[in-house]
Amino acid sequence: MILETIKIAFQSLYSNKLRTLLSMLGIIIGVSAVIAVVSIASGSQSQITSQISDLGSNLINISPGVSRGWGGSISSSSTDLFTLQLGEKIEKNSPHVKRVVPTGSAGGLFIKGNNNFRANVLGTEEDYQSINKYYPEQGIFFSDYDVDNSTNVIVLGSELIPELFPESDPIGQKVKYNINERTHIFKVIGVMENKGRGITGNLNGQAYIPITTFMNKVSNSNYVSNFVAQANSSETANQALEEIKYLLDNYIAENEEYNIFSQDQLLTTINDTTNTMKLMISGIAAISLLVGGIGIMNIMLVSVTERTREIGIRKALGAKKKDILFQFLIESLTLSSIGGIIGIIVGGLAAYFIAQVGGWPFIMSGSIIALAFSFSLVVGMFFGIYPAYRASKLDPVDALSYE
């Protein structure tokens, strides 16, 4: 009985192919939009999370904040407290902190022969490599000796090489760096591997020098820009964060501020934002499913009107109200299920091609497919009930005399 009803439903839908396709269009668009949006968001989220995790583990960034004065007076800035000694103090007095690396950044112009390129130079220490999982591809990174003696050595990010040394090996060569109308000459000792953005910015687009060289010769300052701390493990990252906050709260004046955030917080923010966007856009796509459901209801109402005599004949031959109701519900569910399957295929293909273009992994969750398809069935059933009920309530005499 059920198979026969499904067969009749397919025959009815096939006899009006264009109308059937148009009535499924809303379902197709809604399901494909949900599948594509969730898949694209999941793939890009996975890529971003992987990149950030790969750039370093359990990192905590500490930087001076905005200081405020009273009555027009100028307050002392917490910037003036960010010294190398403060970094040592944090590392020594925070049991869950493995290491603290100071950094100082300044923008200037690199010059090599007829080539020049504007980029940042970052002063730091040898541990900057391990804390960011970022190592030289050529040559070496500077050592503690270079930091202790403020040597003029430099390690270039990968993006600087084609701009300054397009046709030659940079290792061992000299490069000029102009900043604040002063020229500094550095010896290139290494080229860093190609990597993405880290907690300190675009790693590839800057150069690296000893922090003491930066402070004594480039910035002429006793202060650093910020610290990057590394917790002992991912499990102790929150404890490390709280220890650093406690120390800074007691070290820095109350009217001064500092900024501190961990890489875990960054990942949480990205995941929360991505999930919110997925929910919002999926909600918009769900509206298409509702519009598709209205389309199905309209088509089924038209079908009931066109098949009034058929309904009358079936009732005259002994069909009960529940048989007529079941037949039209099956047709409605058939419309929505076919639309859902086509939507899944279209959405999956769209997500796959966009993932290929965007360069992120293609992720298609089975739970989302099941949810989208189930919702399309629910829409088909909900909007098919009224036409089916209307068909089942037709009087056989009136139906047979309908022209």
Image (cartoon, rainbow, N blue to C red):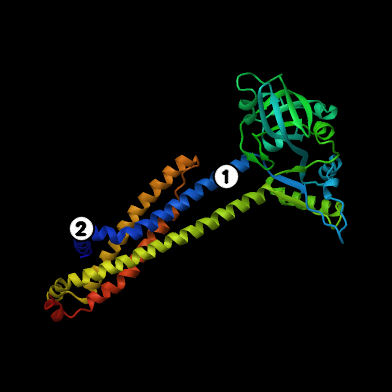
Give the distance between the C-alpha atoms of the residues marked 1 and 2, in whole angstroms: 46 Å
> From this viewpoint, is residue 137 visible?
no
Q: Which mark is residue 294?
A: none
Image location (x, y in percent) of residue 286? 42, 62
Q: Estimate how packed mark 1 is, as few (under 14), some (14 to 19) or many (20 or more) residues with alpha carbons within 10 Å.
A: some
In the rendered image, the vertical position of residue 26 relative to residue 157, given as above or below: below
User: Which of the 4 quarters of the picture holds residue 228?
Assistant: top right
Q: How far from the left and from the top, in percent, is residue 348?
A: 40, 48
The residue type indicated by label 2 comes to Tyr
State left or right for residue 235 relative to residue 152: left
Whichever of labels 1 and 2 marks the residue nearer the N terminus, that label is 2
Question: Which residue appears at 23% of the width and 58% of the height?
Answer: 18
The residue that mark 2 highlights is 14
Residue 122 at what x, y percent from top left?
A: 74, 35
Closer-to-camera residue (346/229): 346
Look at the picture and state if 401 lies above or below 233. Answer: below
Task: Please name the amino acid that badge 1 sits on.
Answer: Ile
Secondary structure category for the residue under label 2: helix
User: Eyeballing the image, is 189 above or below 231?
Assistant: above
The answer, for residue 282, to whether it is visible in the render is yes
Quadrant location of the N terminus?
bottom left
Helix, strand or loop at mark 1: helix
In this image, 370 relative to 121: left or right? left
- Residue at 50% in and 50% down: 41
Give percent across and percent down for residue 140: 71, 24
| Image position of 65 (left or right of 346) | right
Which residue is pictured at 83% across the width and 51% down the height?
247
Write down the residue under mark 1: 48
Q: Quadrant of the C terminus?
A: bottom left
Q: Is residue 195 above or below residue 17?
A: above
Label 2 crowd (10 A; few <14 / some 14-19 / many >=20): few
